[in-house]
Structure formats: structure tokens, C-alpha cells
Image (tube, rainbow, N blue to C red):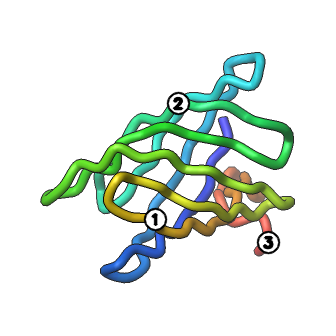
């Protein structure tokens, strides 16, 4: 399971969350995006070692958007776009790794 700390650059400002991904073979990915305290299941595929495409909903207290997110992975960092029928927003983030004593931290710290 891979975990990323992510930020969605929304129209209302940056929204922090997490992305969990598990590869099931043949590039098939499943997991979740948690944003604003809401966990949203994701499914998609790894296009190659640097690109992933995910289909998911983005639920908040006031909306439920059907989305496609495309991410580019560069080392421990990721960036990408979220596309819905209503808008396009940018993602950025960093992979979370286990530190000494089992504590978790960003890979770059």
C-alpha cells in the first residue's frame, strides 16, 4: 500500500488530504482519497511507472462530483489534475514513508 499526503488546489483554497493506493496486478489500482474528512473510493490504472489515472467521486457536505484524476509521479512527489464536469483543479503531494520507530513522515523530511 502506498500513501501520499496530498493537496487539492480548489476554488475555495488548498484542501489537504491523503491518497492510499494498492496495486492489484497488471497495473490495476484501488484505494481511497480522503479530503475534508470524507473517504472516497478510487479505482484506476498505472499507465507506466510515472503516470496513474484514477476514477472517483469527490464528496463534500454540499456536493458530489464524479472525477478523473491523472497524476505524474516524480520520485516521492506527485502532481496532477482533477477533472469533473464542472471544473479542473490541480493536485500536489508527497509520498509518506515509515521512519524510525514506526513513525510516519514525508519522504523528503
**Residue tagged 3:** 108
Residue projecting furthest to the top: 25
The residue lying toward the viewer, choosing from 75 and 66, is 66
Kindly indicate the quadrant of the structure image that contains residue 37. bottom left
- Of mark 1 and mark 3, the one earlier in the sequence is 1
Q: CA distance from mark 1 to mark 2?
A: 19 Å
Q: Secondary structure at mark 1?
A: strand
**Residue tagged 2:** 43
Which numbered mark, 2 or 3, is in the foreground of this view?
2
Query: What number is the disc on residue 88?
Result: 1
- Of mark 1 and mark 2, the one earlier in the sequence is 2
Residue 36: horizontal and vertical position, in percent?
A: 31, 62
Residue 56: horizontal and vertical position, in percent?
A: 42, 39
Tell me whether the residue at label 1 lies in contact with that at label 2, contact meaning CB atoms closer than 8 angstroms.
Answer: no
Residue at image position (77%, 17%) is 26
Residue projecting furthest to the bottom: 13
Tell me whether the residue at label 1 lies in contact with that at label 3, contact meaning CB atoms closer than 8 angstroms.
Answer: no
Kindly indicate the quadrant of the structure image that contains residue 80. bottom right
- Of mark 2 and mark 3, the one earlier in the sequence is 2
Q: Is residue 55 toward the left or the right of residue 85 in the image?
A: right
Residue projecting furthest to the front: 85
Image quadrant for the C terminus?
Answer: bottom right
Which numbered mark, 1 or 3, is in the foreground of this view?
1
Tell me whether the residue at label 2 lies in contact with that at label 3, contact meaning CB atoms closer than 8 angstroms.
Answer: no
Residue 22: horizontal and vertical position, in percent?
A: 64, 30
Classify 66 as above or below 73. above
Amino acid at each position: 500500500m502506498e500513501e501520499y499526503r496530498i493537496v487539492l488546489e480548489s476554488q475555495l483554497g488548498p484542501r489537504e488530504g491523503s491518497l492510499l493506493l494498492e496495486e492489484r496486478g497488471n497495473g490495476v489500482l484501488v484505494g481511497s482519497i480522503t479530503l475534508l474528512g470524507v473517504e472516497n473510493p478510487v479505482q484506476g490504472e498505472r499507465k507506466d511507472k510515472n503516470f496513474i489515472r484514477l476514477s472517483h467521486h469527490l464528496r463534500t457536505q454540499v456536493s458530489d462530483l464524479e472525477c478523473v484524476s491523472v497524476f505524474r509521479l516524480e520520485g516521492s512527489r506527485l502532481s496532477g489534475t482533477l477533472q469533473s464536469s464542472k471544473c479542473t483543479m490541480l493536485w500536489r503531494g508527497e509520498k509518506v514513508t515509515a521512519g524510525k520507530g514506526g513513525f510516519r513522515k514525508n519522504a523528503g523530511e
